Amino acid sequence: MFAVVMEAYVHGVSTRKVDDLVKALGADTSISKSEVSRICANLDEDVAAFRDRPLADTTYPYVFLEATYCKARVGRRVVSQAVGVAVGVAADGRREVLGFEVGETESQPFWTTFLRSLKARGLGGVKLVINDAHTGLTAAIQTVFAGASWQRCRVHFMRNVLIAVPKTAGPIVASIIRTIFAQPDTEHVFTQFHEVVRMLTRSHPKVADMLEDAQDDLLAFCQFPFQHWRQIWSTNPLERVNKEIKRRTDVVGTFPNPAALLRLAGHVLIE
């Protein structure tokens, strides 16, 4: 019974549905508070062990960072809580969730504390950090991983571009920008980048300005091996992780406290 209820919990099954499940399994009463506490204690132990595990044995040259938002009660208020996640890619191409944290905002202090905790656990050899252009996060990266390059996620950048153009022009503008990323080597990438800026200066000057402002960060992937480009120019690997967190947590709705959110999100990531 204990194992079944724990499995239901980590898959985001609501308390009411867990009660229904317990009764369907033949229990006369719904699950007790003491049993809930025992389940939570076991889950917390697993999550803590995962979050505290050493990272020094493996080098992760590429690190993806992103956050998704869920609701939790803090005192008497219901507030949005950021679930920040870091995924590392080892030299052999293996991906691994390095860590995660829950906080009220995606501020620089939040990200700085999180990244320092990863470094304290032994994370090193980071050459490129991939994420959206979030001011607090990019500042934290510069503080904690000063020697690493920053790749601005091309998918998030494209979303920003499409907001800046009429809806009817979106598909054409997006197709033009995508040609930058379809080149066979660094030289051709930069040549095509400047050609795209020239083309868009006439028809969509605001987009041309956006590209020029983002050039260094948008094309950081060019410093790395060609065979890695598709894996490192966006945060798509983390998008899938965040969607699974949202799928599980949406069942719960509002968490009773941030610790409960950390508990469930943690088990999603451990899987």
Image (tube, rainbow, N blue to C red):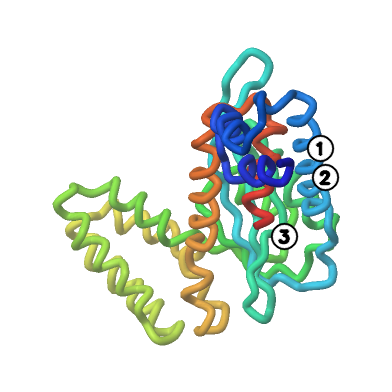
3D distance between C-alphas at marks 2 and 1: 6 Å
The residue where tag 2 is placed is: 45
Q: Amino acid at mark 1?
A: Ala
Q: Quadrant of residue 29?
A: top right
**Mark 1, secondary structure of its residue:** helix
Q: Is residue 155 left or right of residue 84?
A: left
Q: Position of residue 222 (x, y in %)?
A: 51, 77
Name the residue located 75 percent from the left edge and 24 percent from the top edge.
Answer: 33
**2 and 1 marks in contact (CB < 8 Å):** yes
Which residue corresponds to mark 1? 41
Do the residues under discs 1 and 3 have CB atoms within 8 angstroms?
no
In the rendered structure, which amino acid carries the disc numbered 3?
Ala
Question: Relative to the observer, which residue lies in front, 51 or 222?
Answer: 51
Q: Residue 52 at what x, y percent from top left?
A: 83, 52
Placement of 218 over or under 29, stated as above or below = below
Mark 2 vs mark 3: in front: 2
> Between 62 and 206, which is closer to the camera in this rendering?
62
Label ID, residue 266: none
Q: Classify 10 Å Cα crowding around label 1: few (below 14), some (14-19), many (20 and above).
A: few
Answer with left or right where residue 89 lies relative to residue 216. Answer: right
SS of the residue under disc 2:
helix
User: Which residue position holds label 3?
Assistant: 146
